[in-house]
Image (cartoon, coloured by chain):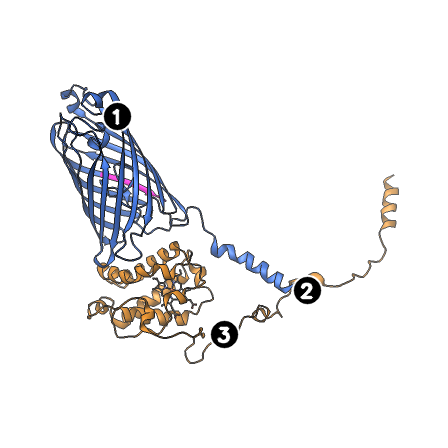
Chain colours: A orange, B blue
Amino acid sequence: MTLALAFALMAAQPVTPQPQPEPDTAAQQDDFSGVDWEKEFGVEKRQVDPATGELPVDPYVQSPANAGATPFSGAGMAKAFGGQEGIRTIIDRFVDLNTTDPRIEAIFKNQDLVRLRRTLFEQFCYLLDAGCTYTGRDMKTAHKDLGTTRADLNALVENLQRAMRENDVPFAAQNRLLAKLAPMDKDVVER
Amino acid sequence: MTVLAGLSIWLSVAPEAHADPLFDGGKLILTNGISTIEGASGGGLASWATIAGMETDRGVGVSAHVTGIELADYGWQSHGVSVGIKDRLELSYARQNFDTRKVGAALGLGEGYRFNQDIFAAKVRLVGDTVYGSTLLPQISVGVQHKRSLDGTIVKAVGAKSAEGTDFTASATKLFLSKSVLVNATARLTNANQFGLLGFGGPNQTDRTLQFEGSVAYMLTPRLVVGGEYRTRPSNLAIAREDDAHDLFVAWAFTRNATVTAAYADVGSVATFDGQRGALVSLQFAF
Ligand code: HEM
């Protein structure tokens, strides 16, 4: 009986495989290497400016008021932060902490970190009255569509506190700067 | 087809970047306050506008605490739990155990007699934020604390009108970052005698009266705060005067989730025994 069943099965099986109607459909479905996604989604490609290393942003009106707060006056705060050199070290550390912090690193993926380092430096240098002006965007425009939450902001504040502490900014001076930034929460938190 | 494939890539990436865990634990350290002796979050003595737990406005948080106070003639122990919902609503429970030690014998209650009380409380944040937003707008919350003395017969024997009572609080709390100073002011409507351990109301005053709680704290580091508090209290009972209470405290968040508080506390006269001051130690875990 088993033998009969085996013969029956063999009879049902075609001797040579039929050619597939459309060869390689499955393989083709998974191969997107040739697809230009920007074009597919109608996204304009942004080209890095060879001089600055930055990507272009939508046009905006430049004004120091975009920094979102009025600067300190007097040399005290700039000195507490170690002048422009100290501010640059703090900002670099701050950006490094944010872009490697599991809580918020996703938000910084595919962002123009060259521009971010420059504009953050300008903003802090301007607010601390350390001899700069701010040329970046206002806080609401800069953080539009990032989907940030209050928890993200708290994480960012902790990273800033750490960067300032590591660079020996006295705690009271740290808080004086945070006092300038704290009222911006509505503009930088989206959700 | 390409659009569909693109969408599926987007879908598989999106949850990673946008998932909100239920216990987000994202609050800034110490901005949940510590647990007061009544279980609500705040200083040690004063209820603040803070909401318990380490959650932010998109999550849920919990905390638990235990507090001990060594006074001249008495011992105090309290413990409790609280839940914070979206940094908006706080629900708390606390149990107070007040050991009369030798005084118990002198009062005819028996040495080591304990007064006990349960406190069920709710607090809701109405507007503002302790840290963020305009410095002119503090975090403002209102709360209700329902207290049940477990010594009904005795507290009525000493003159209390009731063994149960309900306090209403309104608090404003703000961290003035430019000065590293946190300020809290609370108005409390209460008729509790010794926080309610000796019942509610009495021959001097039956109804609730308006009392004040003030706290000032200075931040030394993001995890270390020193401060002082003052709390006025009614004196409803005829047999024993009740004084205002005050404390000086240091609170240290030795990890993100654990805070230890040490304080010098003075509650004045308790059940005719004057000069009740001593050391408070409190441990809080918050997530
Ligand atoms: C008060 C707090 C904050 C300040 C002062 C601040 C400051 C700035 C500044 C100056 C820029 C550059 C503006 C420009 O390119 O013209 C910027 C961009 C950016 N910020 Fe913030 N920020 C804050 C909060 C946050 C938070 C909470 C996040 C997320 C965790 C965040 C993520 C980003 C990202 C990803 C960009 C780049 C956006 C882009 O290039 O399109 N920021 N921020």
Residue closer to the observer: A152 or B84: B84
Disc 2 C-beta below 8 A from ligand 1: no
Q: As displayed, is residue B272 above or below residue A79?
A: above
Residue sitting nearer the eye, B108 or A52: B108
For disc 1, the chain is: B
- Tell us which disc is closer to us: 3 or 1: 1
Measured Cα–Cα span from mark 2 to mark 1: 79 Å
Residue bounds of the magenta highlight: B281-287
Looking at the figure, which quarter contains the N terminus of chain B? Answer: bottom right
Amino acid type at mark 2 = Gln
Q: Residue at position x 13%, y 21% from top?
A: B106
**Disc 1 on helix, strand or loop?**
loop
Q: Quadrant of the C terminus of chain B?
A: top left
Comparing labels 2 and 1, the label whose residue is closer to the camera? 1
- Image point 48% across, 57% down: which residue? B17
Which chain is disc 2 placed on? Answer: A
Residue A46 is labelled as 3
Residue annotated with mark 2: A28
Left/right of residue B181 with respect to residue B93 in the rendered view: left
